[in-house]
């Protein structure tokens, strides 16, 4: 079942077309990886899906409703974003930070305290992201990986069925990359959520994604299963570099290795 | 659910509630301290008033003269109390305006005085005095317009193509401040020599020349704008973490931004029209409240308003008693207390 559908999206920065006539469908229970070279328009497309960037053509529909017609708060209950964390300039505890994810659910947008339910959900996601012991610490006292997990915890606390993740693993070491994506996988399986992950890591995409969307220069080149999209031919075309694609010896998913010319020279 | 996660949740909730209780009682304590300060400051001054009779009369809200002479009664209710209340309004206004700018602009250094907003309001007030001197209400009105224009200019300047860095914001504030300072000098030259002295005094922050007629307006704006800003505290909590994050989590960023700009300009405008530019209140008071009560704006905004009121009442009482019967400008006292305190805060590990 389709949760979020982007139809014929075009986004321009002035005259420059960052995304041109893109179509994208996010289905319940599926992780979609959005891959492509730097400047392909991946983040721009992601930013249009929750209404932060307005498309000049096309529209984004959530459960068959145009998102342009939804209020900011009701949209935030349905779509959540995990981005690179912004630099914090004020001391905030991990619990306070994660409770921020409950904002859209508060009966009062202005004042009001978080209720029992909010605290329970915050407790549960802190547990899931292994941050429960750190909940009273200040965000500035955490390591980069712990902070990134707090950002994910806050997104999970929104209980939104659509997760948009913009390079969520960029600051993480290998094991935390896998943990983070496992949590996303869990959320998609158990809550029938849909996730879109923008990533540069093709192997991670091959390992975790049900669908891979390949972008170049603002255009979507191919959408399909990892095996269909992550091919030598297509990747060479899009990234302009020779790659070697074979099957992962254990999982069988495509394994991508860039072949640099320098290697053959020396 | 496993036992451990249950325990953690309960611990979380308890910890959260303890924090709330602590901060709420701190707010109550501030409110009580403010009330005491109003009473005590009304009793202090160059003219000695009998303590118990004055207190009795104040507590009866002026219904009972309690044995005060007519002159003493007038000093208490026509001069002292209005001035103390004005000091409270000015302090509360500047402090909560500063706290709101800091949250909205994600900059702990944002403050009406440093951003040039106070100077914008000062230029507005002076223009109103020069051109519409007969209409008392034109001063807060034009001060508001001046404050809002200065806010918008600084905000536009700070938001360059590279985004608004804290340094850029303060730099824009300095540029606007110095520009408006020269505008103030220019307007001063349009005045006759006898008024220039009182203007210089007013510019430094001075509660003595304040028109009593505007007191209800200033108090009303302080009270209502404090409530309105506090009612947006949760949005400001998220804006403090970044505009994009706040948007993603459901905050109507543009609406809150406009609201804060307008309310803060109203606060600064009415404060400056009444008392000139009292510096450091908007910087030091929110810092102290955040330091002691945490960053949650639901607590720190009202606490800043109460603390600011308290701070300026104390500063003004010092200003009018240390060299009585002469007076110092209150702005000189707030800077004298504020600057070293601020240096101490910056140096703290």
Image: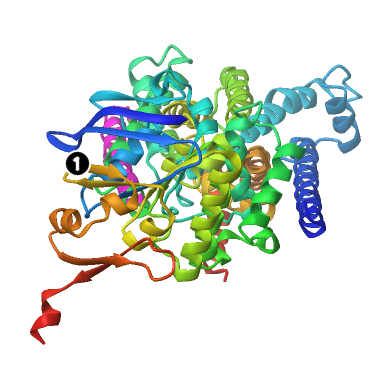
- The location of residue B105, given as percent across then percent down, is 43, 43
- The location of residue A230, given as percent across then percent down, is 27, 55
Where residue B199 sits, quadrant-wise, is: top left
In magenta segment, residue B191: yes
- Which is more toward the observer, B296 or A158? A158
Looking at the image, is A257 positioned above or below residue A8? below
- Which is more toward the observer, B158 or B252? B252
| Residue B289 visible in the snapshot | no
Q: Residue furthest left?
A: A265
Q: Residue furthest bottom?
A: A266
Secondary structure type for disc 1: loop
| Residue B199 visible in the snapshot | yes
Residue located at (65% from left, 38% from top): B298
Relative side of A43 to B312, left or right: left
Q: Main secondary structure of the magenta part?
A: helix
Residue located at (58% from left, 42% from top): A101
User: Which part of the image, by quadrant, shows the C terminus of chain B?
Assistant: bottom right
- Chain for disc number 1: A
Residue located at (73% from left, 27% from top): B75
Residue located at (61% from left, 22% from top): B215
Where residue A87 sits, quadrant-wise, is: bottom left
What is the basis of the colouring in this image?
Answer: rainbow
Residue range (magenta): B170-192
Relative side of B170 to A219, left or right: right
Residue receiving disc 1: A218
């Amino acid at each position: 079942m389709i949760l979020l559908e982007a139809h014929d999206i075009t986004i321009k920065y002035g005259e420059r077309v960052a995304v041109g006539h893109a179509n994208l469908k996010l289905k319940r229970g599926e992780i979609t990886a959005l891959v492509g070279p730097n400047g392909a328009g991946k983040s721009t497309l992601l930013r249009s899906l929750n209404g932060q960037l307005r498309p000049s053509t096309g529209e984004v529909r959530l459960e068959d409703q145009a998102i342009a017609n939804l209020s900011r708060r009701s949209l935030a209950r349905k779509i959540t974003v995990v981005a690179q964390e912004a630099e914090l300039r004020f001391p905030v505890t991990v619990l306070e930070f994660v409770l921020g994810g409950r904002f859209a659910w508060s009966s009062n947008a202005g004042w009001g305290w978080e209720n029992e339910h909010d605290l329970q959900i915050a407790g549960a996601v802190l547990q899931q992201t292994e941050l429960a012991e750190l909940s009273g610490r200040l965000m500035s006292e955490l390591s980069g990986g712990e902070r990134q997990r707090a950002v994910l915890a806050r997104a999970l606390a929104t209980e939104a069925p659509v997760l948009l993740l913009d390079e969520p693993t960029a600051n993480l070491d290998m094991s935390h990359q896998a943990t983070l994506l496992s949590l996303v996988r869990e959320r998609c399986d158990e809550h029938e959520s849909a996730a879109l992950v923008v990533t540069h890591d093709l192997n991670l995409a091959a390992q975790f994604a049900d669908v891979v969307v390949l972008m170049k220069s603002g255009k979507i080149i191919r959408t399909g299963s990892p095996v269909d999209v992550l091919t030598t031919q297509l990747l060479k075309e899009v990234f302009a570099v020779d790659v070697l694609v074979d099957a992962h010896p254990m999982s069988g998913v495509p394994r991508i290795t860039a072949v640099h010319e320098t290697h053959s020279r020396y | 659910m496993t036992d451990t996660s249950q325990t953690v949740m309960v611990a979380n909730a308890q910890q959260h509630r303890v924090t709330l209780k602590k901060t709420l009682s701190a707010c109550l304590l501030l409110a009580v301290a403010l009330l005491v300060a109003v009473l005590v400051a009304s009793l202090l001054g160059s003219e000695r008033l009998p303590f118990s009779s004055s207190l009795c009369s104040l507590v009866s809200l002026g219904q009972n003269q309690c044995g005060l002479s007519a002159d003493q009664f007038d000093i208490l209710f026509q001069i002292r109390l209005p001035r103390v209340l004005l000091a409270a309004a000015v302090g509360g206004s500047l402090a909560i305006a500063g706290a709101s700018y800091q949250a909205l602009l994600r900059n702990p250094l944002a403050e009406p005085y440093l951003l040039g907003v106070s100077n914008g309001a000062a230029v507005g007030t002076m223009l109103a005095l020069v051109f519409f001197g007969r209409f008392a209400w034109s001063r807060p009105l034009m001060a508001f317009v001046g404050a809002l224009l200065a806010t918008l200019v600084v905000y536009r300047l700070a938001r360059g193509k590279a985004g608004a860095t804290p340094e850029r914001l303060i730099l824009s504030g300095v540029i606007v401040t110095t520009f408006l300072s020269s505008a103030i000098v220019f307007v001063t030259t349009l005045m006759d020599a006898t008024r220039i002295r009182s203007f210089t005094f007013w510019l430094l922050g001075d509660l003595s020349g304040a028109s009593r007629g505007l007191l209800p307006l200033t108090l009303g704006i302080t009270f209502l704008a404090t409530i309105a800003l506090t009612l947006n505290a949760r949005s400001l909590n998220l804006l403090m973490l970044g505009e994009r994050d706040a948007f993603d989590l459901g905050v109507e960023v543009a609406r809150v931004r406009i609201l804060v700009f307008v309310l803060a300009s109203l606060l600064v405008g009415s404060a400056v029209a009444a008392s000139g530019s009292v510096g450091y209140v908007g910087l030091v008071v929110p810092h102290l409240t955040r330091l002691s009560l945490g960053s949650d704006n639901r607590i720190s905004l009202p606490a800043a308003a109460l603390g600011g009121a308290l701070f300026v009442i104390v500063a003004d009482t010092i200003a009018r008693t240390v060299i009585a019967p002469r007076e110092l400008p209150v702005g000189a006292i707030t800077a004298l207390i504020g600057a070293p305190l601020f240096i101490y805060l910056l140096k703290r590990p």
